[in-house]
Structure formats: C-alpha cells, structure tokens
Image: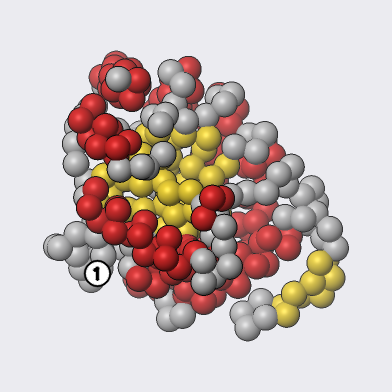
Amino acid sequence: MKPSTFLFGQPLGDYAPLARRADELGFESVWVADHLAAPIEFAPTYPYRESGRPSFVAETPFADPLVLMGQLSAVTQKILLGIGVLVLPLRNPFVAAKAAATAQDLSNGRLLLGVGVGWMREEFDAVGEPFVRRAARMEEMLVVMNKLWTGEAVKHEGEWYRFDTLQMSPGVIRPIPILVGGSSEPALQRAARIADGWCGPPCSLADNIAHRTVIERALGPAGRDAKHFSYWVRSNEATSNDLIARYRDAGFEHLIVALPLALDSMAGKLEWLEQVANWYRE
C-alpha cells in the first residue's frame, strides 16, 4: 500500500506545491473534490452525515477539477491524479469528455476519473440540469464519452443524447479509469456493473468492508472480472499509522487520507505529508 491524499478546501495556489511534494515523497495518488457552486440555502440531504449537512460552506473554495488536473500534471511526474468525485450529470458530456481527455493526455495517462450522480438538487436547478433520473443519464453520458475518447468517427442515439457521425480528436493515449462514487445500494451496484473501480466517501472501516462485499457479490452476475476492479477508500477517522495498518490488514490496497483543514500554513501541510509517508512505510 502506498500513500494517497485528498486535498479539499485548500487555497487554489496550494494544490500545485502540495501535489509536487506528494509526488516527491512517493505518494500513489492525490485527489480533489468537485462542486460548481454552493447555494446559500439548500435542503439537508447530504447522504454521508446524520445532520444532512456537508463539510463545506458557501465560502469553501473549489477549483474546477479538470482544469486543476492540467496544472497538477505539469508539476508532477508519477503520481496518479484523482477526482473524487466529478458530479458528472451537472455537465455536458462533450465538454466533460474533451476536458478529461486533455487532462489524461497532458498527464501521460495518470487521470483517475471518479464520477457521481450528485445529491444537491439546488445545484442542478441552478445550472438547468434535471435532477430526476440523473443516474441513468450519467450512465448514458459515460457511453457517449467512451465513444468520443476513441478518437474515431462515432455516432450515438440514446434517450438523452443523439448525434450524427463526428470525431473528437485526439483520442486518449490510454483508457481513462472510471471510478463510481457513492455508498448507496444503487451506487455500489452501478460501480460493479459499469466502472473500473469504486471511489467511496469517508466512512468507517466496517462500512468500507461492507461496501466492498456488496460490490464483490455483484461483479460476477454483472460479468465483471474482480481482479481488475479497484477500491479507492476513505476513512472518517483521523489519520494515524494504526489506521493505515488496519486498512492494510483488511486487504485494502488504496486508502486515501485527507489533509486536515486545520493546517493553515504551507510548512504544516508539507510536514503532514511527510508524516503520512512515514506512516505508510511502517
């Protein structure tokens, strides 16, 4: 197991030096979050906390994750660049496909594209995208995007998207791994059915094991090879060498730990990255 970190709510200028240092320290991956905008008032429907309220407020800074991937690819060499997760149904599939393909090619194939259906109806209303049946629409979006990523002449006729023969060039230099996010039963089943892996929200080790079990049981009936399916998990506990050891003992290969928001100096953030790298080596 190699270290992976989740960078959330950071000043936009901090991402590049943090990713560069994580790359130097041998981190496997660095991850960023996504939201287009945060309505000042919204219903408490966040699914991963009992309060229904997320960990961010309207003032929390969010970078466009695919633009940010371009910058991070320029300042790093080996580290994988993950989005956990892109709220795909908020976007047009052509725009998302072009941006993701550009990030994949500029990074020499290091993009990990986590996608999710989203939970905030108000954000969908603001951008004029339908909230109802967004999961089915996302699945069709991925079909469209995979066609476009071939770099060949393609056409499509579906429920939401239809176009005559066209070509998006260049195609991707190598396939973009698609990781489906979410921990609901439909999300876990969707990951097993259509994705290369699962990118989970922060939760306990017991819950992560339970979610993995649901996916494992669904892979066979979906005709998928469990050997080629990856689990990128996050914990809701504070990072420690004990936490990392427990996840390693549970058979997880990819544990993503979050940079604490309480760290407000670059020196403190870089020191934390070094400490995490040491814990993973123990």
Residue at x-position 30% and y-position 53%: 209
Name above or below for residue 18 compared with residue 221. Answer: above
Q: How many marks?
A: 1
**In the rendered view, how is the structure colored?**
secondary structure
Three-letter amino acid code at the position of disc 1 = Thr
* Image coords of residue 210 (percent x, y): 29, 59
Left of 64 or right of it: where is 272? Answer: left
Residue at x-position 42% and y-position 76%: 131
Name above or below for residue 9 compared with residue 138. Answer: above
Q: Quadrant of the N terminus?
A: top left
Q: Nearer the viewer, residue 260 or 1?
A: 1
Left of 44 or right of it: where is 35? Answer: right
Q: Quadrant of residue 146?
A: bottom right
Q: Which residue is mark 1?
A: 45
Q: Secondary structure at mark 1?
A: loop
* Image coords of residue 244 (percent x, y): 28, 33
* Image coords of residue 56 (percent x, y): 26, 50
* Image coords of residue 173 (percent x, y): 74, 42
Extreme-left residue of the structure: 51
Q: Nearer the viewer, residue 164 or 150?
A: 150
Q: Quadrant of residue 163?
A: bottom right
Q: Is residue 7 visible?
A: no
Q: Is residue 107 visible?
A: yes
Label 1 crowd bin: few (<14), some (14–19), many (20+), radius 10 Å? some
Q: Quadrant of the C terminus?
A: top left
Residue at x-position 46% and y-position 34%: 29
